[in-house]
Image (cartoon, helix red, strand yellow):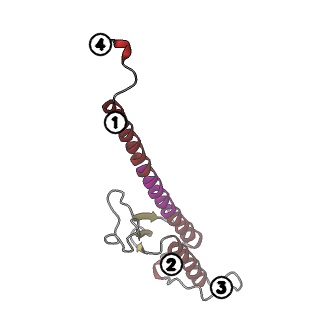
Amino acid sequence: MNNFYNNQGFSLIEVLASMAIIATAVLGTASMQTRALQENNSVAVDAQAAYLGQELREIILSYEHTNYPGLFATIVPDDSHNCKNITCSQEQLAAYSMAIWEKRLNALFPVSTYALDYRTDTKSYTLKMLWDAQGSGTLPGVLECPTVAEKGKYCLDVYPNG
C-alpha cells in the first residue's frame, strides 16, 4: 500500500522541467536586454548626428545674412588660416568654421560623408549626412534625404533669412 506521505522531494523529470522553464525565461530576458542596449546605442548615435547637424546650422546662421546669400554653397573647408589667431575675411572664417565642423564629423563618424546644397529659390540649405551606422566600414546607400527615418542618414533644412 502506497502512502501519500512517504513521497519525499521531486522527481528528476520535475527538476529538469522546472530548470528548462527557468532557463528559457532567463535567456529571453537576456536577449531583450541585449536588444535594448543596441537600440540605446543607435539612438545615441542618431542624437550625435542631430547635434552635429544643428551645430552646422548655427554656423551657417551666424555667418549668413543678406550680404552673403549662399556663402556656404561655394565654401571649401579650409583650416590653413587659423582664424583664432589672425584676422580673417568672412569667406576665410566660414571656410575655417566648416573645416573644424568637418573634423568633428570625421572624429565622431570615421566612415561618413555629407553634402550641403543651396537652393536659390528659397535661399535655404539642405544638409545631408551619411555615416556607417552598422559598423561595417562602408557607407549605407546613397546620399539622399530619406522619406522615413533610416539608420545612418540625417537631413536638415536651414533657412538663414526666414
Distance from the alpha carbon under mark 2 to that under mark 4: 96 Å
Residue type at the position of mark 3? Asn
Badge nearest the viewer, 3 or 4: 4
Badge nearest the viewer, 2 or 1: 1
Residue type at the position of mark 1? Leu
Distance from the alpha carbon under mark 2 to that under mark 3: 19 Å
> Badge 4 local density, few (<14 within 10 Å), some, or many (20+)?
few
User: Which residue in the structure is indicated by mark 2?
Assistant: 71
Callouts 3 and 1 close, C-beta under 8 Å: no
Residue type at the position of mark 2? Leu
Q: Secondary structure at mark 4?
A: loop
Disc on res. 82: 3
User: Which residue in the structure is indicated by mark 1?
Assistant: 16
Residue at x 33%, y 32% (from the top left corner): 12
* Rendering coords of residue 40 (x, y %): 47, 53
In terms of sequence position, does the residue under pointer 3 or pointer 4 come before the other? 4
Callouts 2 and 4 close, C-beta under 8 Å: no
Q: Seen in the image, is 96 located left or right of residue 42? A: right
> Badge 3 local density, few (<14 within 10 Å), some, or many (20+)?
some
Residue at x 58%, y 77% (from the top left corner): 100
Badge nearest the viewer, 2 or 3: 3
What are the residue bounds of the magenta stretch? Answer: 35-51
Residue type at the position of mark 4? Asn
Badge nearest the viewer, 2 or 4: 4
Query: Is residue 49 shown in magenta?
Result: yes
Callouts 4 and 1 close, C-beta under 8 Å: no
* Rendering coords of residue 8 (x, y %): 39, 21
User: Which residue in the structure is indicated by mark 4?
Assistant: 2
